[in-house]
Image: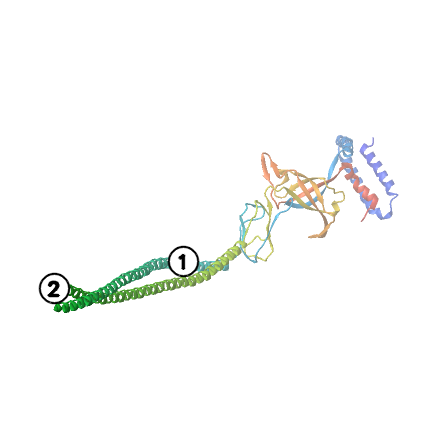
Amino acid sequence: MPHPYTNSSSALADEQDEKQSYSHQEFTPVKEQTKDWHYATEELLDALPRIWTRGVLYALLGFTALALPWSVLAKVDETGDARGRIEPQGSTQKLDALVSGSVKAVRVKEGDTVQAGQILLELDSNILQTELQEAQEKLTGLLNQRLQFDVIKNQLQLALSVQKQQNQSQALEKLSQVNQAKQDLEAKQSLYNLQKLEKQALLNQAQQQINTSHNDLKSAEGRLSIDSRIVDRFSRLLQDGAVSITQIDQLKKEQQESKQLYQKAQSEIKQAQLRLAEEQSRYQATISQLESEIKQAKLRLQQEQSNYQSLLQAGKLAILKNQQQLKDLQTQITTLESQIAQGRSQITSLRLQLQQRIVRSPVNGTIFELPVSKPGAVVQLGQRVAQIAPKNTPFIIKAQMPSQQSGFLKVGMPVKIKFDAYPFQEYGIAQGKVTWISPDSKVSQTPQGQQESFELNIALDQQYLQNGSQRIPLTAGQTATAEVIIRQRRVIDFVLDPFQRLRKDGLKL
């Protein structure tokens, strides 16, 4: 009985020969290789024991019966690979160098978590530190000089205040003396007027007394003349015996009385004249004395007034001198304050320049990009030195997919993400989806040459990796491979693809 496998092998060989008869002569070497393979398989099967041959045949038939429906029904994901890294979604804090210089120290590295105000890197600032120290020392000297000027100013202000008080006190004292001299003059003038009136009254009274005495003298003289004539007439009559001696004696007695009155009147006139002369002398002496005192009082008043004006002028000059000293000092203080302001402005500018040489993080976040990572590097004004992803900013994957794999790429397609830092066999695969695809491809240089690729953004379902009960947060800058599930295909399609390509393109040598 012929071997069943031999028959099947022979039938297969006949079928292959029949197919090969329709092929072109250029495939002859392939045909010969195929025949050699069939012959080797047939010999191997013939060499097996019969029970093994049947077992293998049954196994192949069973596998084919199971695999063929499975390959038709089962589907697998067809993916396109894209390389990328984690970046923050939306805007990031881009830090540029505010000044040029060499890097003195780098305090962080990419992926580090930083706090607002934390130092990222420092530029060399030895020259600025020296200038700042010199400016501070100069400012200290100016401030000390300012304190000395303040002391002098306080002393001058105190002297000015004392001078004003002294001027006021002396002016009041001198004014009091002026007023006293004025009052003394007024008193003497009043006394002069009073004494003049009194003395004038006494003179008038003495003159009146003289006038009265003259009147009495005239009256006594008239009476004496009458009495003398009567005595002479009666004396002649006595000789004639016309009158008695007694009458003559009586008349003589009256004559004598008239004579005494006349003499008395003369005496009173002399006394009145003496009294008038005496009163006139007293009047002249008193008036002269009072006029002299008034003159002295006027001179004293003029002297006091002159002293008062001199005192006021001297006090005013002293105040003006102090004020001029204050003014000159204030000018020096103003100049000094200008220098102090310039010094402070210079220190502020130097401190600002020092602050500009220290790059700090403006926000809480993660170092996403750090172009300058080593001390000694030279940075230019405006050069990018760091890029920070703000805290709590969601991460996305920015990746590039070769254009050959992007034919069925669409927004919303699911993505499997494998992070280079976390082996997927241990940490698993992260899930995501495509949220954006660049409208045009970009050409990039690779070790294999120029390659066209599309940029795409991939949103992460979770911002961490789950390893058992442990959550590992993702950080910006981590690289990953994103497998975009472009479509699902049947397993049998992968088996049939080579034959379909062979049928379409033919066999290429």
- Residue with the mark numbered 2: 244
Q: Nearer the viewer, residue 484 or 246?
A: 246
User: Looking at the picture, how far across and down is residue 124, in whole percent?
Assistant: 52, 57
User: Looking at the picture, how far across and down is residue 385, in whole percent?
Assistant: 59, 53
Instruction: Please identify the quarter of the rendering in which residue 374 is found.
Output: bottom right
Mark yes or no: residue 406 visible.
yes
Instruction: Please state which amino acid type lies under the numbered disc 2.
Output: Ser
| Distance between mark 2 and mark 1 Cα atoms | 127 Å
Q: Nearer the viewer, residue 48 or 446?
A: 446
Residue for point 60% across, 44% down:
390
- Residue with the mark numbered 1: 150
Furthest toward the left, the residue is 245
Q: Is residue 173 above or below residue 27?
A: below
Q: Is residue 454 left or right of residue 334?
A: right
Figure label count:
2
Q: Nearer the viewer, mark 2 or mark 1?
A: 2
Q: Is residue 60 above or below residue 122?
A: above
User: Looking at the picture, how far across and down is residue 229, in whole percent?
Assistant: 18, 68
Q: Is residue 82 left or right of residue 261?
A: right
Instruction: Please state which amino acid type lies under the numbered disc 1.
Output: Asp
Q: Nearer the viewer, residue 365 or 147?
A: 147
Mark 2 Cα shell of 10 Å, populated few (<14), some (14-19), many (≥20): few
Residue for point 73% across, 49% down:
441
